[in-house]
Image (cartoon, rainbow, N blue to C red):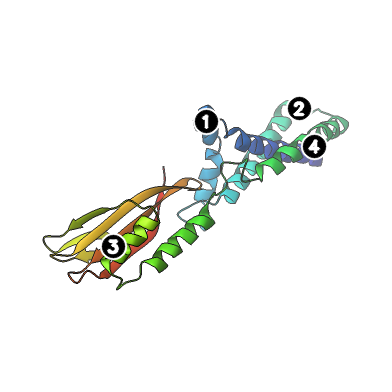
Amino acid sequence: MTKHRVYVSLLSGLGFVSLVCLLLNIPVANFFLLALFTPGGIAVSTLPWHTNWISISALLGANVVIYSVLVFVVFLLWFKTMEPAKLTQISRWIVLPVAAVSCLACLPSLNPLWPRGMMELSKQESQLQNDLPVGMRLQDARSVLQAHKIQFHELIEESESIVFQTAEKTIKAGPGDRVFSSEFQTAVFSFPCGYDLQVILVFGRDERLKARYVHRLPICP
């Protein structure tokens, strides 16, 4: 009888999480529905091997397990006298709907949590890096940015300063250096972050590119 409860509980947990994923397409319900993934997020973030981000597969899997356990507890507390035949009947009723919503939730076009546009962003990032090699002329770089329809700010440094800094990279500009800077939003999304693309170009007095930074910038809640 226990195996019947486990089977129905797993189906219920899987179906519930898949349905929530599909309902995320309704904008007015997003905040409440995303909160339903909190238990799985907390569980995955406490594991010793977790990184700075939580993969969508791990998040969904953890929530399926947690909600399946909750359903199993409900069966034990309030439906412990239910006959195996009844549990079998319930599983037959829900297996097809669960399979349907689970398959739909696996489609990136229907599940807003799946990554979108990451491959295109990588290509765009690589293309810009190739098109803006160190040593290229200022006017050529300006033409490349205009060809990619990238709007940018331009200024001439009056003194030596740090124009860009991260934990991995620092870019400095000296007096008379010309700096192009741009940060623009993309349509790329990988839960829970969107992505901007950041471009920093520093040209020396000889009007040649001497330092650059062309990389994605995660924008996370």
Q: Amino acid at mark 1?
A: Pro
Q: Separation of disc 4 and disc 2 at Cα?
A: 23 Å
Q: Separation of disc 3 and disc 4 at Cα?
A: 56 Å
Q: Which residue is mark 4?
A: 96
Whichever of labels 2 and 1 marks the residue nearer the N terminus, that label is 1
Q: Separation of disc 1 and disc 3 at Cα?
A: 38 Å
Image quarter in which the C terminus is found? top left
Few, some or many residues within 10 Å of mark 4 (<14, 14–19, 20+): few
Note whether residue 167 is visible. Answer: no
Left or right: 70 with respect to 164? right
Whichever of labels 4 and 2 marks the residue nearer the N terminus, that label is 2
Judging depth in this view, the residue of 141 and 165 nearest the camera is 141
Name the residue located 19 percent from the left edge and 65 percent from the top edge.
173
Q: Is residue 45 above or below residue 15?
A: below
Whichever of labels 3 and 4 marks the residue nearer the N terminus, that label is 4
Label at residue 79: 2
From the top left corner, tell me how far across and down residue 95 is, in percent: 79, 37
From the top left corner, tell me how far across and down residue 185 is, in percent: 40, 47
Q: Amino acid at mark 2?
A: Phe
Q: How many marks?
A: 4
Q: Is label 3 in a helix, a strand or a loop?
A: strand
Judging depth in this view, the residue of 164 and 2 nearest the camera is 164
Judging depth in this view, the residue of 71 and 178 nearest the camera is 178
Callouts 2 and 1 close, C-beta under 8 Å? no
Name the residue located 53 percent from the left edge and 28 percent from the top edge.
29
From the top left corner, tell me how far across and down residue 137 is, in percent: 28, 69
Q: Amino acid at mark 4?
A: Leu
Q: Which residue is mark 1?
A: 27
Q: Which residue is mark 3?
A: 201
Callouts 1 and 3 close, C-beta under 8 Å? no
Q: Amino acid at mark 3?
A: Leu
Few, some or many residues within 10 Å of mark 1 (<14, 14–19, 20+): few
